[in-house]
Image (tube, grey):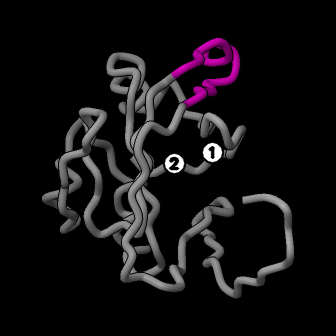
């Protein structure tokens, strides 16, 4: 599925949260498996991302229909998407807010990145078919890793 709402929660251990509506086909898959992969696309596959978001996996093999390549993950059963810049293998670690908010807390157990991509133009959903593409990067001194 394509996901609109997610956020970083913690660095150590690496925790994310995501909202998956109980009306989505993916909700049942996520609650059954308790694991997933967050694949991070770039602008180069934006049309495929939108097409995936406008269809359901209950009736469509999105990999075949939209020309995406599934690659096995190392720590979870869900696949990586080879065309994506990065992938985060995740396990669900907290479902305490699922019933009220459809919010899952995920721990990243393995991360992948395409080292050949030096300045990824990642997509960020703004709602209603609008996306921001990541651009300029700046580096400032910091005591953080």
**Magenta span: chief secondary structure:** strand
Between the residue at mark 2 and the residue at mark 1, the CA separation in whole angstroms equals 7 Å
How many numbered discs, if any?
2
Mark 1, other Cα within 10 Å: few <14 / some 14–19 / many ≥20: some
Give the residue at x 63% y 45%: 6
Residue 113 is drawn in which quadrant?
Answer: bottom left
Residue 36 among magenta residues: no
Assign the C terminus to one quadrant of the image. bottom right
Pointers 2 and 1 in contact (C-beta within 8 Å): yes
In this view of the protein, can residue 38 be seen by the observer? yes
Residue 38's tag is none
Left or right, residue 18 beside residue 32: right
Q: Secondary structure at mark 2?
A: loop
Q: Secondary structure at mark 1?
A: strand
Give the residue at x 32% y 43%: 56
Left or right, residue 83 beside residue 107: left
Q: Is residue 113 above or below residue 74?
A: below
Front residue of 8/25: it is: 8
Residue 99 among magenta residues: yes
Q: Is residue 35 above or below residue 144?
A: above
Q: Is residue 124 above or below residue 43?
A: above
Give the residue at x 51% y 48%: 3
Q: Is residue 11 above or below residue 145?
A: above
Residue matched to label 1: 6
Mark 2, other Cα within 10 Å: few <14 / some 14–19 / many ≥20: some
* Position of residue 139 measured from the top left corner of the image (x, y, whole percent): 78, 81
Residue 32 is drawn in which quadrant?
Answer: top left
Residue matched to label 2: 3
* Position of residue 98 measured from the top left corner of the image (x, y, whole percent): 61, 18
In this view of the protein, can residue 17 be seen by the observer? no
* Position of residue 33 measured from the top left corner of the image (x, y, whole percent): 33, 21
Magenta stretch, residue numbers: 93-106
């Amino acid at each position: 599925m394509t996901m609109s709402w997610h956020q970083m929660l913690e660095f150590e251990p690496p925790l994310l949260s995501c909202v998956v509506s109980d009306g989505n086909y993916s909700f049942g898959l996520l609650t059954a498996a308790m694991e997933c992969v967050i694949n991070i696309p770039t602008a180069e596959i934006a049309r495929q991302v939108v097409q995936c978001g406008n269809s359901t996996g209950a009736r469509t093999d999105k990999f075949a229909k939209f020309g995406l390549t599934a690659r096995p993950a190392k720590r979870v059963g869900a696949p990586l998407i080879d065309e994506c810049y990065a992938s985060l293998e995740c396990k669900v670690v907290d479902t305490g807010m699922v019933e009220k908010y459809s919010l899952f807390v995920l721990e990243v157990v393995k991360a992948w990145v395409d080292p050949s991509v030096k300045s990824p133009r990642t997509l960020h959903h703004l709602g209603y078919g609008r996306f921001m593409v990541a651009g300029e990067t700046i580096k400032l001194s910091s005591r953080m890793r």
